[in-house]
Each structure stands twice: as C-alpha cells, then as structure tokens.
Image: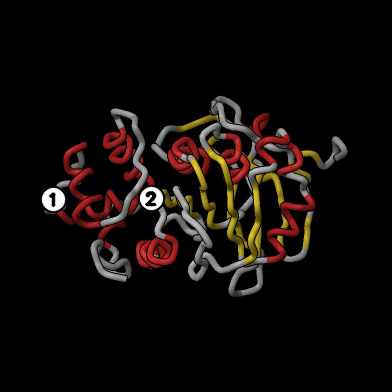
Amino acid sequence: MTAANLCDPRALLGEFESDLWFPRYRIAESGTWSLRVLPMSRTRGYWGDLYNVHGCPMLFGPSKDGEPEPWMSLSPIEIEAQETGIRAAHGHTAVLGLGMGWVAANVALRPKVTQVTIIERDADVVAFVTSQAVFEQLPREARSKIDIVEADALQWQPNGAVDVVHADIWQPLIEPRKLDDVRRMHANIGARQIYFWGQETEIWRAACRRSANHHELDSALLADIVADQLRLPLILSERPDYAGRIRAGARWWGGHNDDWWADANIPEPGFEP
C-alpha cells in the first residue's frame, strides 16, 4: 500500500473514539465494488450525537439502476450500530454479510469466539475484501477462526450448532422486510442469539405503535417488546441507558420525518414469516 492510496479509518474518525479494531484499506476498485474516502467534517452517530471527523471510508457497490451506491461505511453511525453485536459475540458466530470485512474481523478478535463463519453471496465482495488483505492484518489466532462461505444468507443452513448470528445484509438502515428476513434466517440457522444491524429501529417502531404514539421506551417496555412482539432471541446492549439511547437515536433515524415509524410500507412488528 502506498501513502497515496492508503486509508486508515481510525485517523479519519476525529473526535469519535472507539476501542474496536480497524484495518487499513486501499482506495481502489475491484469488479463491481470500490472503496472511496468521502470528504466529511461533521457527522451524527447512531445514538444521535454529533462528531467532528476528517472523512469517511465508504464501500460502493451495484444498484438497480447501474450506478454505484454506498453499501457500508466506517463512520460513527455504522460503528455504534454494530458494536453491540460485536461485543456479545462468542462461540461459533455466523456473520451474515461480509461488507468491508470490519465486523467479521472484530468478531474474530473477541476472546470468547472460537469460530467465525462468514456468509456472503456476492463473489465480487469476497474478491474485494481479499484484495484488500483485511484479514491478513489480524493476528494469526484471530485469522485462523475465519471461514468464508459463498451462499445466500436467506437460504444458508449450517452443518452444526451456531451460537450467535450477526446479520447485516441490507443497504438501508430502515428496510420494510428486515424482520421478515431475520425470522427466515433464524428458522434456517437456529442460533441461540441474534443481533441484526438496525434492530433498535424495529424496537422503537414497535414501542411507538404499542404506546399509542407517545414515543416512550424504558427497560421494562423494551423487554416486553422483544419477548412479545419481535419474538427473537436478540442480543441487547448491557448498558443501563440502552432504552434512553434508543429514544435519543430514534429522532434521527428517519431523517426529518419524526413519524417514519408509521410508514405504511413497513409491516407491523410481530407478524409471522
């Protein structure tokens, strides 16, 4: 990697701090995918806080109209949204969706993780991450845990037990069929615990509809929603202010539309797959 095309994500994070691991990337194209650094001076995190940053490494990929679209970034919103699942990973963890390889690498670094199976259906994504030598930058012990399987995450069935699923196969944060997809994956895999990217948006949406639009959420209501409506063995943050963080972040997830959770195109939580 030369200095001209080298990207160090941590150096771009500015005042945003994280103890998670970050690989170095090359600004490059491979097949239908490319990595770019977007100029950025200020951005909001997943929980609503603003941070001064120096730029954002972003993975661009194909879209329906043929123009490259952003699929993943190493920005405060993505990092904060993924870390709950990363920190709780243990045993055999299946990472559904390779992305930039950052999530899987951090899962492999967790001491309680013994095996990481990455499920990715796009061979070009696998080739891109391979060309970036993301996993080669890991210590040997962490690198040896990783196995990549080219398969559709919605259809993949493991040969043995899976302890944790960490799923991120969607482009937008708020996706109409996300819960449907997660339940389908859970039916195929049967993991003991699940984390999926943006799960807090589903928790908040259920809370708003359940509490007569009062936009309320506390720890007790959160537990009820997960057990009674989402009905998935979700990994939830152990932070005592988790419910408050969801409330704070929810204001920003739908852009300038405070009632994004009421979108008729997004089914009611609690439906059967």
Q: Residues within 10 Å of mark 1 (few under 14, many from 20)?
A: few
Residue 252 in picture, x, y percent from top left: 37, 45
Q: How is the image coloured?
A: secondary structure
Amino acid type assigned to the residue bearing label 2 in the image: Arg
Residue 31 in picture, x, y percent from top left: 77, 65
Q: Is residue 176 visible?
A: no
1 or 2: tag closer to the N-terminus: 2
Check disc 2 and report the residue beneath it.
Answer: 192
Element at badge 1? Answer: loop
Q: Is the residue 49 above or below the residue 254 in the image?
A: above
Residue 159 in picture, x, y percent from top left: 53, 62
At 50% from the left edge and 55% from the top edge, which residue is drawn? Answer: 168
Q: Is the residue 158 above or below the residue 248 in the image?
A: below
- 122 to the left or right of 162: right
The foreground one among 94 and 236 is 94
Residue 130 in picture, x, y percent from top left: 76, 52
Q: Is residue 70 visible?
A: yes
Q: Which mark is residue 132?
A: none
Quadrant position of residue 6: top right
Check disc 1 and report the residue beneath it.
Answer: 211
- 32 to the left or right of 4: left
